[in-house]
Structure formats: structure tokens, C-alpha cells
């Protein structure tokens, strides 16, 4: 694993903690980066209550 990738356990928060949109985005991206395939990614996101669209980043216009 490269130094730039976060561990899933570093991103997933304890149950009951409120998380903001940026934390959800980072968690979604970490799951996608560390999943073995699309099916595993979808299953993990579902288990965590996340949606793939939450991992998208807005591109600057132009």
C-alpha cells in the first residue's frame, strides 16, 4: 500500500459519531481505493451507509 492511501480503519468512525460531508467523501474514496473489485466496493459502501456519489469531487469549470 502506498503512503498516500489511507487505511479504511483510519477513515471509518465509531458508531454514533456525526460525520460531515468531507469525512463521508474521504471514507467513500478510501473504500473504493482499497476494494478488490466493484462488487466488494458496493457491499462495503452499503454496510457503511455510504453512496458512491459521495466520493465524487467537483471539477473546476473551465
Image (cartoon, rainbow, N blue to C red):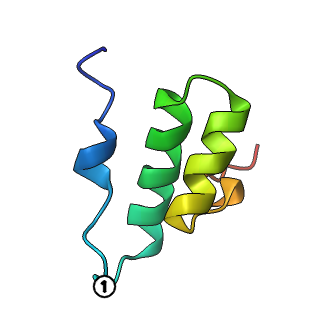
Residue 58 in the image: above or below residue 40:
below
Q: Quadrant of residue 15?
A: bottom left
Taking the spot 68% from the left edge, 46% from the top edge, the residue there is 42
Total labels drawn: 1
Q: Quadrant of residue 13?
A: bottom left
Which residue is under mark 1?
Answer: 16
Residue 50 in the image: above or below residue 20:
above
Q: Quadrant of the C terminus?
A: top right
Residue 55 vs residue 32, the one in the foreground: 32
Q: Quadrant of the N terminus?
A: top left
Residue 7 coordinates in the image, percent (x, y):
28, 36
Residue 58 coordinates in the image, percent (x, y):
65, 53
Taking the spot 62% from the left edge, 40% from the top edge, the residue there is 41
Q: Is residue 43 left or right of residue 39?
A: left
Q: Is residue 54 left or right of residue 33?
A: right
Taking the spot 66% from the left edge, 25% from the top edge, the residue there is 37
Taking the spot 44% from the left edge, 40% from the top edge, the residue there is 30
Q: Quadrant of residue 16?
A: bottom left
Q: Is residue 8 left or right of residue 54?
A: left
SS at circle 1: loop
10 Å crowding of disc 1: few (<14), some (14-19), many (20+): few
Amino acid at each position: 500500500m502506498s503512503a498516500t492511501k489511507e487505511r479504511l480503519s483510519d477513515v471509518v468512525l465509531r458508531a454514533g459519531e456525526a460525520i460531515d460531508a468531507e469525512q463521508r467523501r474521504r471514507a467513500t474514496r478510501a473504500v473504493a481505493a482499497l476494494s478488490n473489485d466493484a462488487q466488494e466496493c458496493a457491499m462495503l459502501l452499503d454496510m457503511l451507509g455510504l453512496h458512491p456519489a459521495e466520493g465524487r469531487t467537483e471539477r473546476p469549470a473551465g
